[in-house]
Image (tube, rainbow, N blue to C red):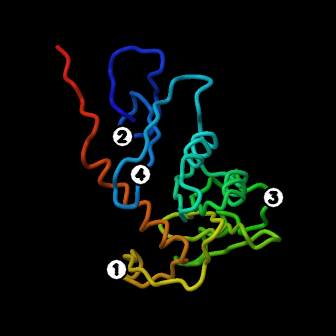
Amino acid sequence: MVLYIRNHGTKQFIKGKPIRYGYKFSCGGTSTGYLAWIKAYQGAGSLLGYSVVVTYADLLPKDFPCEIYFVNLFTSIYLLKDLDQQNIRATGTIRSNRIMDCNIMKTDVLKKRPRGEFDFRSDESKRLLICTWNDNSVVTITSNFDAVQPGCGVSRFSQAQKKKIQVQQPRLILHYNIHRGRGGPIGRTRIFRFIGYR
């Protein structure tokens, strides 16, 4: 969200965000942190979710192996299957209401398990993987190329034991955190700055 106070037809309100009023932008960056594309939301009929990713995935070089990482706003099972057919590797967090008929452990059940517990399922072709992991909250993630094992241990603070403990983390979540974190320089450069009004 880019902060904008005055009235305009495409201005958005999103409850719970640090910047609640303004313009909504979708952007993609490279693994080195450079901005590759940016698209402003232009009201009803403009690209949202699935369409945004597919439109810009078509611009990727076909002979160069690419990996795309995205947040749950964009992720769906259909999107990952379509990207897999185009030989584009993709991983993204996914909302629990978008995993369709997958018999993965429910969020409420996994919350009651110890920290670091996870459950995963794959489709018949073994091309699509869905994994839920219990950290501070339950994270659901899906990928069309990555795997759960070998996992790694991550350090987390335990309120019960009052010390840092090692928690098991699936490999695809490790890769997601590494690559999604590369977009940080885009935000830090503050491409869009708030302009004061009299």
- Residue occupied by mark 4: 29
Closer-to-camera residue (68/136): 68
Residue type for callout 4: Gly
The residue at 56%/64% (across/down) is 138
Query: Residue 93: x percent and y percent?
Result: 57, 58
Closer-to-camera residue (63/95): 63
- Residue occupied by mark 3: 101
Nearest to N terminus: mark 2 or mark 3: 2
Nearest to N terminus: mark 4 or mark 1: 4
Quarter of the image where the N terminus is located = top left
Q: Quadrant of residue 140?
A: bottom right
The residue at 59%/36% (across/down) is 48
Query: Residue 96: x percent and y percent?
Result: 66, 55
Query: Residue 99: x percent and y percent?
Result: 72, 56
Q: Are marks 4 and 1 in contact (CB under 8 Å)?
A: no
The residue at 63%/70% (across/down) is 145
Q: Nearer the viewer, mark 3 or mark 4?
A: 4
- Residue occupied by mark 2: 18
Residue type for callout 1: Lys
Q: Residues within 10 Å of mark 4 (few under 14, many from 20)?
A: some
Residue 162: give its label.
1
**Above or below, comparing residue 186 to residue 81 in the picture:** above
Left/right placement of residue 160 relative to residue 72 reads: left
**Above or below, comparing residue 158 to residue 58 in the picture:** below
Nearest to N terminus: mark 3 or mark 4: 4
